[in-house]
Amino acid sequence: MAATTHEPDVVHHEAHENRDKKYVLIALILAGLTVIEVLTYSIPDAFGGKASTTLIVALMVLMAIKFWTVAWFFMHLKFDKRLLTVVFYAGLSLAVLVYLAILTVFRFWGPPESHMIKNT
Amino acid sequence: MTDILPAKLEPAGALALPSGASAPTVAPLGVFGRPKTKTGWRSWVSTVDHKKIGIMYGTAAMVFLMIGGAEALLIRAQLWAPRQHLLSAEAYNQVYTMHGTTMIFLVVMPIGAAFANYLMPLQIGARDVAFPRINAFSFWCFVFGGLFLNSSWLLGGGADGGWFMYAPNSGVLYSPGHGIDFWNLGLIIAGIASLTGAINLIVTVLNLRAPGMSLMKMPIFTWMTLVTQFLLLFAIPVITCAQFLLLFDRQFQANFFNVSQGANPLLWEHLFWVFGHPEVYLMILPAFGLVSDMLPVFSRKPIFGYPFIVFSGVAIGFMGWGVWAHHMFVSGIGPVSVTVFSLTTMFIAVPTGVKILNWTATMWGGKLRFNAPMLFCIGLITMFTIGGLSGVTHSVAPADTQQTDTYYIVAHFHYVLFGGAFFGFIGGFYFYWPKVFGYMLSDKMGKWNFWLMLLGFNLTFGPMHILGLQGMSRRVYTYDANYGFEIWNKVATIGAFTLAASILLFIVNIFVSYAKSKKMEKPGPDPWDARTIEWMIPSPTPEYNFDPIPTVTQLDDFWYRKYGETEDGRLVRIAKTEDVTQPEHEAHVHLPSPSYWPIVTAFGLPVAAYGLIFSMWLALIGGLIVVAGIYGWATEHPDDPDAAHDVDHGPDGGHASGDDHDAVHDADAGDGDADSATDDEKEVAPVG
Amino acid sequence: MADVATTLDTSFDDAPDPDVAHGGHGYATNTGLSNTKLAMWLFLASECLLFGGLITTYLLYKIPAAGHGPAPHELYDIPFTSISSFVLLMSSLTMVLAVSSIERGDNQRFRLWIVATALLGSVFISGQVYEFSSFVSEGMGYTTSRSSSAFYTLTGFHGVHVTIGIIMLVSVLLLSHRGHLHRGNAETVEVVGLYWHFVDVVWILIFALVYLIP
């Protein structure tokens, strides 16, 4: 970002206008993804049926894409120093790994209600 | 947000560098004027100087050490003989809980923070930390959190659930008093201190190094500080999460640990130990860093395998996240989990062993000088090795099943935390005392101090291995005769009082040496013939640290300004120490300005916490104090416009932009600081 | 190991690129990043572990013990929550447009987008208040079951984060009205924006993990 301020104003403005257009486009894509997410609720059969593995995997993938898109473009990770990406994803992956491990130790996976409902 | 000044004070849009602005002095909210004094209690209360804050961290930690130590002596006195009634069972529960909590959160962690605050900026050649006011805020949060926690003694008794506060024992049903609420809220406040401190110190290490000091040229203590602060950054939110769940359970009847609602108390254990295991590494790593910087000085050799010692520290940091469930082998987590965590626990011994090897190899063939700091270093290496080995026995799950909840565990973690971390810290005190206070501690008394401490330590905790294997349970207020426990308990109690005497001797040394120092010569910048750049500035450290800021060319830069090597590898002196150290002089360096707002903001937190326990009105008042503090903080100019700023004090070469570097650097620190007032708001508001 | 050492040495080396060091914000730090931005990212990284813990708790406690009131997922009004999720998502767009405006010095549009962001955030919060009160009236109070405690705590923490974000946006707006914000310190807005987007991505996770997965 910093580097662009050195360029002449005209170029600068155009660059920004272009970027704004891209932002709107990205937001539209995000909105589209959200619509697909909601479709898993209204027509679950298109995703292999309610509570099917396919549906859950589809939701996870959509969620991950949305997350990444916001972080990469809106949070400017694409345009910033790589160190920031490293720092943030270090925290995120640590969180994911640790909490997945906890869920695994609790035997969270598998058919619903096999875990936790009994007082272990 | 550099200029969140009332509009009338600064013309719109004029974002001059703060150092250049000449706005009149502001008194936000009309309460506090800008603190000006450089001496007296006001200068300490309002300081943002990392050195003063470091000293205050150390002092506060020593005070809490007295409290925690007194609790330890009570425990040992109670266990002197079978069936004693010096303490009731209830009182005993409170005393051991508060002993553990105090020693971990209010003694060992803050001493680490004291060294990190004082030393790390000096080791990287910085003027201060990245956010000086947040640094002050962190310190006051820690002090207020600690005082709040200990005030429970006067308000109905301390927490009584053990330092890990297992659910559902920590619920209102089993602990109806307020002790656990004090524990919970006090540690949440101390957690805010750790989190803001961690962010601050990480940014400092990454951003404010002197020219030429790349990461792999940093002293090892700075490296270990970086790893420690990353561990804090990621571990604190986990315990905060768990503590909020407990808070809501106790205050608002939530059901996170309510077994009758089908809740699983193991959730607390997991969250606690996911925090708790990185926690033990973040207590030990600062001491490892100190030892790694002291050993080469007293061996007159470079550290053996610098990259290995750095990366083993980083590896410990990473692997520390994958071993937490070894604290829970007997909680019924299942054979697969037990096996996995057994293996990871065995693996983490490897990077730790690498460090032990490196230290030993550093001493090998060196010209050893056995001054007090060196003795403490060697004490750490040997005692920590014993503690590390007993730790490896825990990774063998069947053995651990026998050891869990016995004195064997108590012996183990005291060998690593007292024999490890604390020996390193006391050694660090002896080593850095002249740099901080301008006089040497008596080496002779220091040696007595060491041997007495080593003796007392081993007498206290050595027998606990045997007691534990004999089956004596920890956390039980007494024991019956004829189990064979009597003799070892007597030895341990004698040891504990010997240990107390050695701490007392350290304190006596401080005062005696101070009195003697008036008649003695000043120690000068470099009393130990040391290696890292903090020793090239006057002792005690001047307010501005370095002037000019040195350009670093290699690891142990200061050493290689003094010494060179002949072709056959012999050490030769190339410059006199006086010629390469910086003389003391009157410098007009622009420094971050002091402020009352950090302490005001931090003060609101315990008020709000008392409110959560006793009356919601008080909570509201506390919240308002926090909000007012943040407002005052944000509207105060980060740099006092009246402060002197006239001479160029940039680094001594290396940067092309000699002219404006200093101004840019100052503006940077100030700007960031103001901004992060909003940053605090986020962390503070949910609590307040 | 030496290879890693060299990589570290070069990637975070001092003597930053002159363009970066003395460009827009006038920073001369070793990484070329401003202290504030780096601090905010570190803070957000640590927040991942806070929300991770709360989400994990919810997932474990998703189903209440028998006889303790309705489960949260029996009460969800997915169309309603979808709309409020959409609102929060769009507030990320307005936020990024605000940052973009201030970076080219367009104060008028900048304020417009900030107001829009704060309003969208408020709509989201109002939606949450409405949702909570309707759940309570349907018999799921905070203390009803382990699931209700976990649900309200998780979404409540997120709501508090959004509220603080709105307060920060309003502060930014006031600053701008007093003329303290311009191209030179656009980074202040960018940092507030980072926080705002983070709150949005957390909701992306909550929406999928808590609401949509049956």
Image: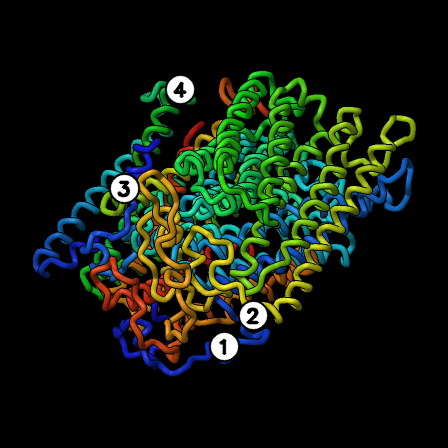
Q: Which residue is mark 2?
A: B45
10 Å crowding of disc 3: few (<14), some (14-19), many (20+): some
Q: Nearer the viewer, residue C40 or B48?
A: B48
Q: Are marks 4 and 1 on the same chain?
A: no
Query: To which chain does the residue with label 4 belong?
Result: A
Q: Are marks 4 and 3 on the same chain?
A: yes
Left or right: B42, with C102 as reference point: right
Q: Earlier in the sequence, mark 4 or mark 3?
A: 4
Picture quarter with the N terminus of chain B: bottom left
Picture quarter with the C terminus of chain B: bottom right
Q: Which residue is mark 3?
A: A72
Q: Which element type, helix, strand or loop, lies under badge 3?
A: helix
Q: Which amino acid type is marked by label 2? A: Val
Give the answer, above or below, for where B511 lies relative to B265.
below
Q: Which residue is mark 4?
A: A53
Image mark for residue B478:
none
Residue name at image x 33 percent, y 63 percent: B668
The x, y position of residue B248, in whole percent, is 62, 46
What is the CA distance from the residue labelled 1 to the residue labelled 3?
44 Å
Question: Mark 4, mark 1: which one is toward the viewer?
Answer: 1
- Are the residues at dot 3 and dot 2 in contact (C-beta closer than 8 Å)? no
Q: Which residue is mark 1?
A: B35
What is the CA distance from the residue labelled 4 to the residue labelled 1?
64 Å
The x, y position of residue B30, in whole percent, is 49, 80
What is the CA distance from the residue labelled 4 to the residue labelled 3?
28 Å
Query: To which chain does the residue with label 3 belong?
Result: A
